[in-house]
Image (cartoon, coloured by chain):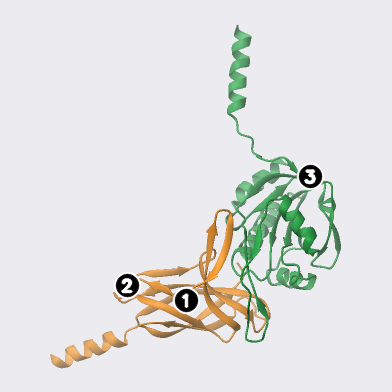
Chain colours: A orange, B green
Amino acid sequence: MNLLILFLGLFSLTAPQIKIENAWMRLANKGMNSALYVDVTNLSSKEDELTDVSSNIANTVQIHVTYKQGENMGMRRIPSVTIKGKGTFHFAPGGFHIMLIKIKENMKAGDKKEFTLTFKHAGKVKVMAIVKRD
Amino acid sequence: MKHLLIILISVLILSGCKSRFDKDEPLGRKNITLISQDSVQINFPQDFSGKTMLMGFMFTNCPDVCPMISHNLQLVQAKAKEKGIKDVNFVLITFDPERDKPWILNEYAGVRDIDKSNYKLLTGNKGDINTLMKKMQFVAIPGDTSKTSDGDLIYFFTHTDRVYLIDKENKIRKEYRGSKLNIAEVIDDINSLE
């Protein structure tokens, strides 16, 4: 019985706490800017925080949000995004996105590019994003 | 009395009808010289007279809103082609001409597979573009500047999210939210101006 409890405890520690789906980035050539969009689901009941995103495909990778101010649209960098326990956070066009500044290589639709998302509790999670036109 | 009643009812009906187009503002007689993505000189808006135009402003370093606008114009272009609407042009003018040179615009069009037959990306003199934007009540405010690790400047703009429907006589007839364009509505409006 103790062994079973230990096994279940270990399993809950190693079970994935974050699920990443629908990861895609906008097609771009070398030198251009682009954006990564993704759905992040927090599988744990405890709140988590996305604190960083990194990738080799762009010079600079930042978490940004597009905001509306009357008829105008602006964009600002934000340090992190909170994902509620058992909640899903959507990075989508016109809203939160991962800004990719100065893409390092030409790409084509259908390519897959690797990103690492860093969470405060869940740690580093790798994801492959598909390159798409809008 | 009967005639008076008919006239009165007609007036009431007509006054209740809303025009499809809420604007009728000339773009102005003065042309500005712009350069297309193919490095062709364009007299704007004169070179687009005689056809309806769906136009807006953008900058190529925009990662989010401007690609949505340029894509929406492509969707309208494709729908117009499907419906056999021929007398229409699609134009985006950059408000960041220091960075958006013709070859940059050409690359932007290329990665998006833009059909350039009647869809033009234009750049030119910043002062002239600013004057046109002011006339069209379009705002683009540069934000803080920083640098990449390679020393390249990074700056973005807060800008109006709007595209304009211009008739064959170069008058602004309607405005739409560019990033959330209702394609069917725009096609109906273009058809109405045919």
Is A45 situated above or below A121? above
* Badge 1 element: loop
**What amino acid type is highlighted by mark number 3?**
Lys
* Residue B168 numbered mark, or none: 3
From this viewpoint, which residue is outermost toward the top?
A: B1
Q: Position of residue A115 (x, y in %)?
A: 51, 83
**What amino acid type is highlighted by mark number 1?**
Pro
Q: Quadrant of residue A33?
A: bottom right
Q: CA distance from mark 3 to mark 1?
A: 48 Å
Per the image, the residue denoted by label 2 is A85
Which of label 2 and label 1 is nearer to you?
1
Q: Position of residue B119 (x, y in %)?
A: 75, 59
Is B19 situated above or below B120? above
- Residue shown at 36% from the left, 75% from the top: A42
Q: Quadrant of residue B140?
A: bottom right
Q: CA distance from mark 2 to mark 1?
A: 19 Å
Q: Nearer the viewer, residue A112 or A85?
A: A85
**Residue A59 visible to an observer of this rendering:** yes
Q: Nearer the viewer, residue A114 or A62?
A: A62
Per the image, the residue denoted by label 1 is A79
Instruction: Please report, as a chain letter, where disc 2 is located.
Output: A
